[in-house]
């Protein structure tokens, strides 16, 4: 399949972006100032991320739709309020994660944001589960911009009046130059911020407006270091079809009623994980010293037994140290537990850490 | 000190007597982006021309560092291990990686001049 470009491709180029292929799209990995600078700019000020490669799905329907969707998405979609967003996932029969997503209740039904690499498969899963009873659209004419960082709210309020009153994980309709937008207060960096859904036709004009307000463009490189510091999972690495949400330490994302009642794909495995059969857990890992532990690095106990592996790792610019996430056997998952990481055939000491590595307060 | 020479694996080398100083090129440091980790060979280790002699890691990925010449490692630069970011600031100066006692000086003949290396990186930008 030919590589795709987002509507902002030429604008990224003019801003000095370096591109990499990602999930079938030619995406900016960084701009001229580099990943560490982009990361710190987002934590200190405000950064703009083009996340238009992600899937924007809308489904129209009422309470019937909520009941049908609950069969594949384990959140309480009957109780969710209009314009409220929830982090969740699509599960498979084995209780693994087909994709993680953000679902938002809107007047006409639900909007769902999906990972780029999974969106076409997700569309098939959702369509076949809903059996053509509802109108489902994977929007190709919409772009998605994330504005992230402590100055996001002040800046966006100047451009779009009223956005600063949104609470975290809530959205609403707004207008920009007469164009309809849907904006949620959300993101994947561990910072306050917004995600703006806007038509491809107007996105470049809107992006330029943000840049003119001293917002810096940020690439996928810094997006990865930011989300890892915030302890957030990258689909296909930290979570996949073989990891259950309980193993992934994402129990909080399954609504209480759903945990008790079930009624969704893969509940059998999830229920048994909840009831004590859990054998491994996603944890934070802090290597001693500067060694970087990347995906695939094996984790050992003090007495040399293999107890798990790393699923992502990098240098965290804001915590100024090497950080990683991975899965270990349950009895080694307590923060502070001493472990060893095998990097280039040598064992390096590390400790299990609490997540996130970096903590900010969201506007609630 | 001799004129700086360059390898296709993006190392530079200067020679004083029979001791060579080796580091990674400015071009390489720019391609890597922010360097966050450096691993150097142990003192006394014998390394082979074009063989692996160290590791540099950026936020994105790990890359091997090769030696452009055969010989014994006589000294390593601890300051780049302690402050990996210095590789981005002065890759072809203060942020040298290691020194080698040269075994065979004729190996230097196959390396590139600055002009040739600049041409090489223009033709092979990645």
Image: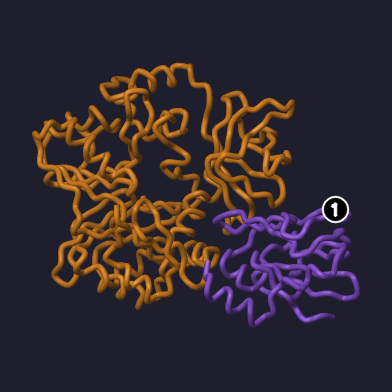
Chain colours: A orange, B purple
Is residue A202 found left or right of A287 in the rendered image? left
The residue that appears at 87% across and 58% down in the rendered structure is B72
Q: What is the tally of numbered marks visible in this picture?
A: 1
Q: Where is residue A156 drawn, in percent x and y?
A: 31, 67
Establish if B47 lies above or below A293.
below
Quadrant of the image occupied by residue A82: top left
Residue A354 visible from this viewpoint: no
Residue at 79% in and 55% down = B41
Q: Chain of mark 1?
A: B
Please tell me which residue lies in front, A92 or A352.
A92
In x, y percent, where is residue A312?
A: 53, 44
Q: List the residue tagged with mark 1.
A: B45
Q: Is residue A251 left or right of residue B96?
A: left
Camera sees residue B122: yes
Q: Secondary structure at mark 1?
A: loop
* Figure quadrant of residue A146: bottom left
**Residue in view at x 46 percent, y 45 percent:** A232
Q: Nearer the viewer, residue B14 or A156?
A: B14
Q: Nearer the viewer, residue B77 or A211?
A: B77
Please provide percent x and percent y for residue A151. 41, 66
Residue A214 position, x and y percent, is 40, 75
Mark 1 packing: few (<14 Cα in 10 Å), some, or many (20+)?
Answer: few
Q: Residue at x 18, y 59 (%)?
A: A141
């Amino acid at each position: 399949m030919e590589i795709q470009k987002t509507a902002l491709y030429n604008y990224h180029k003019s801003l000095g972006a370096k591109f990499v292929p990602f999930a079938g799209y030619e995406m900016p990995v960084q701009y001229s100032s580099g990943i560490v600078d982009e990361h710190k700019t987002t934590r200190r000020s405000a950064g703009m991320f083009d996340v238009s490669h992600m899937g924007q799905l809308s489904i129209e329907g009422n309470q019937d739709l909520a009941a049908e969707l609950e069969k594949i998405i384990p959140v309480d979609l009957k109780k969710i309020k209009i314009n409220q967003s929830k982090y969740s996932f699509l599960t498979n029969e084995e209780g693994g994660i087909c994709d993680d997503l953000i679902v938002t209740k809107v007047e006409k039904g639900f909007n769902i944001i999906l990972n780029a690499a999974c969106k076409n498969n997700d569309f098939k899963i959702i369509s076949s589960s809903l059996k053509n009873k509802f109108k489902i659209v994977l929007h190709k004419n919409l772009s998605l911009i994330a504005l992230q960082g402590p100055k996001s709210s002040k800046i966006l309020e100047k451009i779009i009046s009223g956005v600063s009153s949104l609470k975290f994980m809530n959205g609403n309709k707004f207008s920009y130059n007469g164009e309809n937008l849907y904006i949620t207060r959300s993101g994947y960096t561990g910072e306050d911020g917004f995600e703006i859904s806007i038509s491809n036709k107007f996105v470049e004009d809107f992006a330029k407006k943000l840049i003119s307000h001293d917002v810096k463009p940020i690439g996928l490189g810094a997006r990865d270091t930011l989300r890892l510091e915030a302890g957030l999972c990258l689909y296909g690495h930290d979570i996949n079809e073989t990891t259950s949400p309980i193993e992934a330490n994402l129990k909080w994302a399954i609504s209480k009623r759903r945990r008790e009642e079930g009624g969704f794909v893969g509940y059998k495995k999830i229920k048994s994980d909840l009831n004590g059969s859990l054998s491994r857990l996603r944890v934070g890992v802090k290597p001693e010293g500067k060694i970087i532990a990347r995906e695939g690095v094996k984790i050992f106990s003090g007495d040399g037994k293999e107890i798990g592996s790393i699923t992502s790792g990098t240098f965290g610019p804001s915590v100024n140290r090497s950080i990683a996430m991975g899965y270990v056997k349950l009895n080694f998952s307590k923060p502070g537990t001493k472990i060893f990481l095998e990097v280039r055939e040598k064992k390096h000491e590390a400790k299990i850490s609490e997540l996130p590595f970096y903590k900010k307060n969201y506007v609630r | 000190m001799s004129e700086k020479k360059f390898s296709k694996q993006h190392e530079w080398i200067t020679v004083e007597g029979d001791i060579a100083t080796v580091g990674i090129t400015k071009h390489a440091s720019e391609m890597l982006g922010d360097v966050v980790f450096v691993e150097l060979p142990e003192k006394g280790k014998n390394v082979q021309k074009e063989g692996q002699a160290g590791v540099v890691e950026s936020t994105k990925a790990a890359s091997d560092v090769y030696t452009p010449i055969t010989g014994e490692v006589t000294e390593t630069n601890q300051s780049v291990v302690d402050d990996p970011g210095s590789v981005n600031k002065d890759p072809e100066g203060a942020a040298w990686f290691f020194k080698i006692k040269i075994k065979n000086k004729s190996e230097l003949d196959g390396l590139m001049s600055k002009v040739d290396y600049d041409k090489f990186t223009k033709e092979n930008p990645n």
